[in-house]
């Protein structure tokens, strides 16, 4: 059974039900709910990592509360930090089915004074079991700590802790029916790139707030929760790239690769990234550059708006492909400030990631070029069934997208409607570029007036 999200009377959404496929595409006018839906899916999935972190914290603080009150409060705080106050939606209800019988519900309390997060019996039972396992180990180790321990006994204790933490991680993954890494790439990414060479501090805060302060200008820029996470992932990637170059990372992976397709996939991804950026990314001594060859380069915050917007989309995806990570990825508006050819190439890169380890990707977009690019890869898969060699001369087989793994929705007037032609296995052509039809119709009417 697949995972499923239902939203009722929340923000611009009246009633929406989304069944999660490995590839989900959301289109629609501004303020139609694309971001509302994608953020909700990410939130419900991210409760897995929140629970794991909470259990580790309980163990380290020797605090073992079998009631989920504290965890639920933290989850509610996170939900509000993602969406802001939601009390203006008294009838809202968000339900997420994890595909294994478990579900989590969010709704406002009947008196509309606060928001409830409701965990079902399956979650509560597993929560109590995990807390009990941690308490039992803590009690055992507390008894041992009263004795003088040899280095060998201390090593055994650490191994026992590590084994339990690994077991708990596996059990939490099973509870949420997912073990993929989670990554959300929000819109407005160019802001972070623009400020990357400036001096600023990020205050992450225990209450999930964030701010950016330029000490010279004295300006304050508040960042939302998802942008904070995005910055954290960028910082981790920068640290990695400061230790070792991208070429070295690729060489190390290829030296250990067992799959004969690995080199072809990584080289294809690397070429797509360099083509999209029109250069090569370099991080050196705390400074980011785009190198163009012939000893020409530019600081990243002086690069084009398209390069600034896309640089960390493509680099993070490239790192995921190189390291062959399992991932659930949300990309908001990958087309921002990009020439249509680059939009096509970024969909190739996303398809390459989606086909690796059966990864899961959500894309929100306004671009007909994005939809058409997806359609080409779906069509290549359909034709490749009978004409594999000929199709591969046109489209690399690692980019083909299985139509059964993909769904596309248009969000409008508070609802979501699938725009997949099930017979063709393609996105309906009539939905790809309605604006062009309107523009052409207007032109034809004007042309008739001239006659």
Image (cartoon, rainbow, N blue to C red):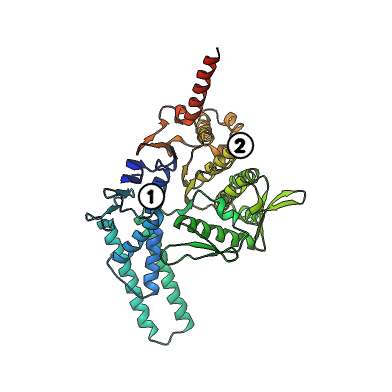
Farthest bottom residue?
A: 148
Instruction: Find residue 431 and report its horizontal and vertical position in percent.
Output: 45, 30
Q: Quadrant of the C terminus?
A: top right
Q: Is residue 381 above or below residue 201?
A: above
Q: Which labelled disc corresponds to residue 341?
A: 2
* Structural distance between the alpha carbons of marks 2 and 1: 31 Å
Q: Residue at x 39, y 45 (%)?
A: 37
Q: Is residue 336 above or below residue 58?
A: above
Q: Is residue 206 left or right of residue 319?
A: left
Quarter of the figure with residue 208: bottom left
Farthest top residue?
A: 451
The answer to which of 152 and 300 lies nearer the viewer is: 300
SS under mark 2: helix
Residue beneath disc 1: 40
Badge 2 density bin: few <14, some 14–19, many ≥20, Cα 10 Å: few
Q: Is residue 297 left or right of residue 372?
A: right
């Amino acid at each position: 059974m697949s995972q499923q999200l239902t939203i009722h009377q929340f923000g611009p959404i009246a009633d929406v039900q989304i069944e999660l496929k490995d590839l989900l595409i959301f289109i629609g006018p501004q303020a139609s709910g694309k971001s509302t839906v994608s953020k909700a899916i990410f939130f419900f999935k991210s409760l897995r990592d929140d629970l794991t972190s909470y259990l580790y914290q309980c163990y380290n603080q020797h605090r073992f509360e079998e009631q989920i009150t504290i965890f639920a409060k933290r989850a509610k705080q996170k939900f509000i930090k993602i969406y802001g106050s939601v009390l203006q939606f008294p009838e809202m209800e968000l339900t997420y089915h994890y595909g294994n019988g478990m579900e989590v519900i969010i709704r406002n309390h009947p008196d509309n004074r606060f928001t409830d997060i409701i965990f079902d019996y399956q979650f509560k039972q597993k929560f109590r079991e995990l807390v009990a396992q941690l308490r039992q180990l803590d009690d055992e180790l507390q008894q041992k700590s009263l004795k003088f321990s040899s280095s060998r006994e201390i090593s055994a204790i650490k191994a026992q802790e590590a084994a339990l933490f690994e077991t708990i991680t596996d059990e939490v993954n099973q509870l949420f029916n997912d073990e993929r890494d989670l990554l959300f790439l929000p819109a407005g990414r160019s802001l972070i790139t623009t400020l990357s060479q400036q001096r600023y501090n990020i205050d992450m805060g225990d209450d999930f707030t964030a701010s950016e302060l330029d000490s010279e200008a004295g300006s304050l820029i508040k960042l939302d929760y998802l942008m904070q996470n995005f910055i954290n992932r960028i910082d981790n990637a920068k640290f990695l790239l400061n230790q070792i170059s991208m070429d070295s990372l690729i060489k190390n992976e290829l030296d250990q690769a067992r799959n004969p397709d690995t080199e072809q996939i990584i080289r294809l991804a690397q070429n797509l990234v360099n083509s999209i950026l029109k250069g090569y990314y370099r991080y050196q001594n705390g400074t980011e550059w785009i190198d163009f060859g012939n000893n020409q380069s530019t600081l990243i915050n002086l690069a084009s708006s398209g390069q600034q917007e896309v640089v960390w989309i493509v680099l993070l995806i490239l790192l995921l492909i190189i390291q062959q990570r399992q991932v659930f990825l949300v990309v908001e508006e990958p087309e921002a400030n990009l020439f249509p050819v680059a939009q096509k190439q970024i969909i190739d890169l996303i398809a390459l990631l989606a086909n690796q380890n059966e990864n899961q990707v959500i894309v929100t977009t306004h671009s007909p070029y994005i939809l058409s690019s997806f359609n080409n890869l779906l069509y290549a898969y359909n034709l490749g069934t009978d004409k594999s060699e000929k199709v591969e001369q046109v489209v690399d087989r690692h980019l083909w997208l299985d139509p059964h793994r993909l769904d596309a929705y248009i969000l409008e007037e508070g609802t979501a409607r699938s725009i997949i032609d099930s017979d063709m296995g393609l996105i309906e052509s009539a939905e790809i570029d309605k604006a062009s039809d309107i523009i052409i119709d207007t032109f034809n009417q004007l042309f008739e007036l001239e006659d």
